[in-house]
Amino acid sequence: MSTPFYVSPEQLMKDRADFARKGIARGRSVVVIQYADGVLFVSENPSQALHKVSEIYDRIAFAAVGRYNEFENLRIAGVRLADMRGYAYDRRDVSGRALANAYAQTLGTIFSSGGEKPYEVELFVAEIGDEASEDQVYRLTYDGQVADEHGYAVMGGAADVVAGYLKERYAEGAELGDALRLAVAALGHTPDEKGVARDRVIATRDLEVAVLDRTRQRPRKFVRLSPARLEQLLGDRASSAPEPAAGETTTPDLLGGAGEVEGEPPVAP
């Protein structure tokens, strides 16, 4: 009788975590920034069909990196959960915190089970309030951990490099245009093949940008920014690209629903 193959639980969890992290790092980063009137989502996404940023409910949005089929299943489940809770109770009973907890339970169960591979995804769940102090941004990792983010956050791709760029330049309470330019510049600050960080200009057509805007009069606060609006906000970036400080070295997933586009008729959720 042969001896069964044995792997310690610690090694098994480490291997599953490494597998998930490598899959997530292969994608492009998503940046979330809190600005004066809401929460901004920016990602580099050349696809016009596969969205990484989506609406979940009136004041709640979702962003993800990793495998599209996996986080799209999570997005759909989140929409259904929010709709059921809002229908059974009240629309005000649907909260980003409850949705983040539901996602955390799902991701944690999948990660700890030995019967299937872990999800190669990371998620942002954001909810805006009537005041900036009431805004909430939650980050969920592949193993179900939840972190409450403040100011800005990055996931996927070269997240550490992009986050370092934002840390040096982020200012609380910025206007939408300033926050957008900072986020796009941070996404373009990525390492090349040699690992040296360099700045590049990301074409407007390759950007996916959406906001939760508390100043909107409609109950639904989620809106996608059209290419024309992005051009207006970003201006001439080629001539105004940020210069690196002395001694500073300079540092790009296509992989996440429907939403209303600014300047276009609303789409039914």
Image (cartoon, helix red, strand yellow):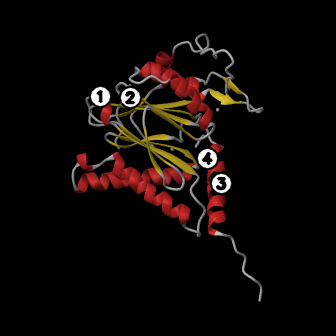
Q: Which mark is residue 216?
A: 1
The alpha-carbon separation of the residues under discs 1 and 3 comes to 42 Å
- Badge 2 is on which residue? 264
Query: Closer to the N terminus: mark 1 or mark 4?
Result: 4
Query: Are the two marked residues, 2 and 4, in contact with CB atoms closer than 8 angstroms?
Result: no
Q: Is residue 118 above or below residue 208?
A: below
Say which element carries label 1.
loop
Residue 1 shown left or right of residue 214 in the figure: right
Question: In the rendered structure, are the residues bearing label 1 and label 2 in contact, judged by CB atoms less than 8 Å apart?
Answer: no
**In this rendering, which labeled residue sits more in front, label 3 or label 2?**
3
Residue 136 drawn above or below residue 18:
above
Task: Classify mark 4: residues with Cα within 10 Å, few (<14), some (14-19) or many (20+).
Answer: many
Callout 4: SS: helix
Q: What residue type is disc 2 on?
A: Glu
Graded by Cα atoms within 10 Å as few (under 14), some (14 to 19) or many (20 or more), the crowding at tag 3 reads few
Task: State whether residue 144 appears in this view.
Answer: yes
Residue beneath label 3, please?
18
The reply to whether the C-beta atoms of the residues labelled 1 and 3 are less than 8 Å apart is no
Which quadrant of the figure contains the C terminus? top left
Residue at the spot x=36%, y=54% of the render? 80
Q: Earlier in the sequence, mark 1 or mark 3?
A: 3
Mark 4, residue position: 24
List x then y, in percent, for residue 30: 54, 36
Task: Assess disc 1: are there few (<14), some (14-19) or many (≥20) residues with their C-alpha within 10 Å of its C-alpha.
Answer: few
Instruction: Select label 4 or label 3 by which is in front.
Output: 3
Q: Nearer the viewer, mark 2 or mark 4?
A: 4
Identify residue type, mark 1.
Answer: Arg
